[in-house]
Every structure is written in structure tokens, then in C-alpha cells.
Image: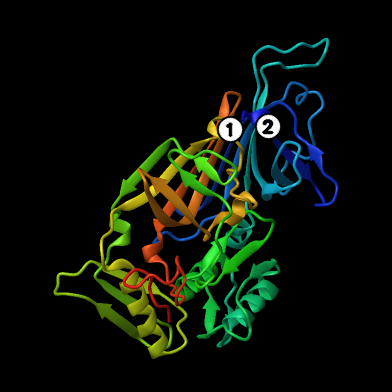
Amino acid sequence: MPVSNYTIEYSTNFSTWSYFTDIQSINGRIGRTAFIDTFQPSQLTFVMRYPTGFYSPNTALVTGTWVRLKRTGTTRTMWTGKIATVTVEWGKVYNTTTNRGEYDYVTVTAEGSFAEWGRLDGNGNTIVSTNAAYALGEAATESGLPIGTTFSVDTSPTIDTSTVTGSWADWINKFAVTLSATVKDGGGQLGVYTKDFVGSLPVQFSDTTNNATNQVYEEIQLSSQVENYFTQIIIDTDSYGQAVAFTGAGPYRTLKLETFSGSAGQALDLANYYLALYQTPLVGISQITCRSEAQNTWALDLGYEWYDILGYRTNVTFRGTSYYMSILGSTFQATPSGSTFSYNLASAAYLPFFILDDPNYGVLDTNRLSW
């Protein structure tokens, strides 16, 4: 599926959309590589021919213009963000009669909404000790930026009073660490999902089966990552000191995290929770890569908008064995010769859930209790 099978639209008001033409290549990135990584803004970079740009420039090619990525001929949006940078490469040949520069190109980099949170200073705003869902609502009010969440007022834990001394993105990342939340970026506004969010994809991956519900992959990486192995967890809080959980004897592999934990007990529960996730080194699937042209029926957006697949679970079949995985992040590349999608994965053994009698979420000695 070459780059011509994808469409990039732009809008200055998010209601009237036009098409960019002569797209030559597209590269996109969402999510994380490992659990330990902080969340970063998603990004889309594309290159297009710009032969009339010198004489008649596209005035929408400026910072702040909305862009969205789609598959040509479909209504589902894969990714949405705003232009961050525009760079023009002027070719040496220019036709003054037709006012065309056939070797002129423009490179556009767009970012998800999390980039706006990162550029916005918190100005010392205080969010008082409150329900986590209310805290997110207060963050949206004080920052002036929209946010979507699966945190519920009825079920959310209380977090400590916090002062936003850095950027609002710093505050969101600390919030995510405190509650092991997933931050989704690339849908036009930020999304914060609870650690207990459970979603299974209608599409899985296989090294042999190739149909609408099984996308075949060409490359697979199995690894044991140093970023996912710690024997001591130290939780720093703003009001309740430190909580420490460890296993075995020192010297320890230590992970230290700053949080908004709302009590000493909550901090200790969090330390034990992260210790349960990280105390056993695992060798498992960390990434797979799929080529669009190899699919009998294309479904590499996995049945959802591409940006939204983070945190969802799926199966990866490798040499006859099925592995239950969670999607941490993904990259996407399209050129005139075709397109590929890579998915960063983590074993479901890291995931904090247990549902009695469930074939996926209720496996004794495998699935983990949450707090």
C-alpha cells in the first residue's frame, strides 16, 4: 500500500478540510517503547512536492494548522495533530515562464496535542487534594486544553495536592506514574486512561495466518529489556515521604519514581505494584513489523483509529504459540513503494489485572492483582 493510498488533510478551523497533494513520504510515531518511558508527543512528518510554492505558496503551511491522516477512500482518521515546523527545499531549476520549481519540496512535521501541554508552563497552579477524575478536569480548566479520560468520579482514587512548577506535560506524566495511567496522543485532544482499562482488539498478529482478523508480520524482536527489570522501588511523595518495596538482598536494581500519592499507604501499594511488574526479568516479544502489501485484507490500524491502539491487548502467534500482548507504541512509514507498521509490545504478564475465570485475564500465577 504505497503513500498514494494515504491522504493528509489540513484545516485552519477544524471544520473545513482540504487535501495536500503530491505526498512523497510519511512517517508517524505514537506511544512508548518500554513501560518505563515517559509519555511524549506523537508526531507525523511528511514530504511533498511543492512546484508552485515559490510563486503561489500554500498559506496554510504554518505552525498551528490542523492536519489529519487517513487511508484514501475511508472515513476513519488514523491520526490528528497540528503543524509544528515547515521546511522548504528549493531546487536549482526554476521555470520563470510557468512559475514552477519542479524540484522544490516541503517537509512538514506535525505534533499531537500533548506537545501543547509540554509548551504550556504551569505557572505554579495548585490542584488541591481530590479525586483523580476531578484533578484531570481541573488541569484541563487551568491549562485551557481539552482532555478525555476513562477515570470516573465514582471509582477514582484521591491524589495529593500538587503544584504545577514545570510544564503541564510534566504534571500529566507524574499523574500517569502515580496511577499507572496510559496517555494517548494523536486524536485531536489528550486522552488519559486508567491502569484497569481493558480493551481487546478485533485484529491479532500471526507469522502464518493472513486474513481480515490476522495480520501477518515479517519481522519480530524478542528481548529481555534492562528497562523492565528492577528489584527495589522507591516512591517519592510530596507530603508522605518515601515508600520502599524490594525483593532479595542488595545491591538492588532501583527504580525511583516521583508521584502525587494521596497517602503513605497508597504510596506503599504503588511501590509493591511496580515491584510485582518489574522484579522478574522476562524474555518476550518487544516489537513486530508488518508490511501493508503482505496483507490479504488490510487491517493494520487494528480496527481502531491508529493513535488509539495504545493499551489495547492482542495475540501474537509465533511458531505455533500464541502470546498475549499489550501495545505500548507504534511507528508508521509510507513511500511510493509501500508502507510498514511497527508495534512496540509488552507481555500481558506485566499487566495489572485479574478477572476470575476469564481465559485471558484470569490465569493463575500469570495475571496480577491490582491495588
Query: Do tag 1 and tag 2 residues touch (Cβ < 8 Å)?
Result: yes
Q: Which mark is residue 5?
A: 2
Q: Kindly identify the residue that appears in the image at 28 percent across and 62 percent down.
A: 229
Instruction: Choose between 98 and 330: the one closer to the eye.
Output: 330
**CA neighbours of label 1 inside 10 A, class few (<14), some (14 to 19), many (20+):** many
Residue 77, above or below 311: above
Instruction: Choose between 220 and 365: the one closer to the eye.
Output: 365
Q: Quadrant of residue 365?
A: bottom left
Q: Which mark is residue 323?
A: none
Q: Quadrant of the N terminus?
A: top right
Residue furthest to the right in view is: 16
Residue 95, above or below 371: above
Q: Secondary structure at mark 2?
A: helix
Name the spot of residue 245 as percent of width and height, x first.
28, 79
**Label 1 sits on residue:** 334
Name the spot of residue 362 as percent of width and height, x first.
42, 72
Q: Amino acid at mark 2?
A: Asn
Q: CA distance from mark 1 to mark 2?
A: 9 Å
Does residue 83 appear anywhere in the picture? yes
Q: Quadrant of the C terminus?
A: bottom left
Q: Amino acid at mark 1?
A: Ala
Does residue 166 appear anywhere in the picture? no
Q: Kindly identify the residue that appears in the image at 66 percent across and 77 percent down.
A: 137
Q: Secondary structure at mark 1?
A: strand
Q: How is the image coloured?
A: rainbow
Residue 139, above or below 20: below
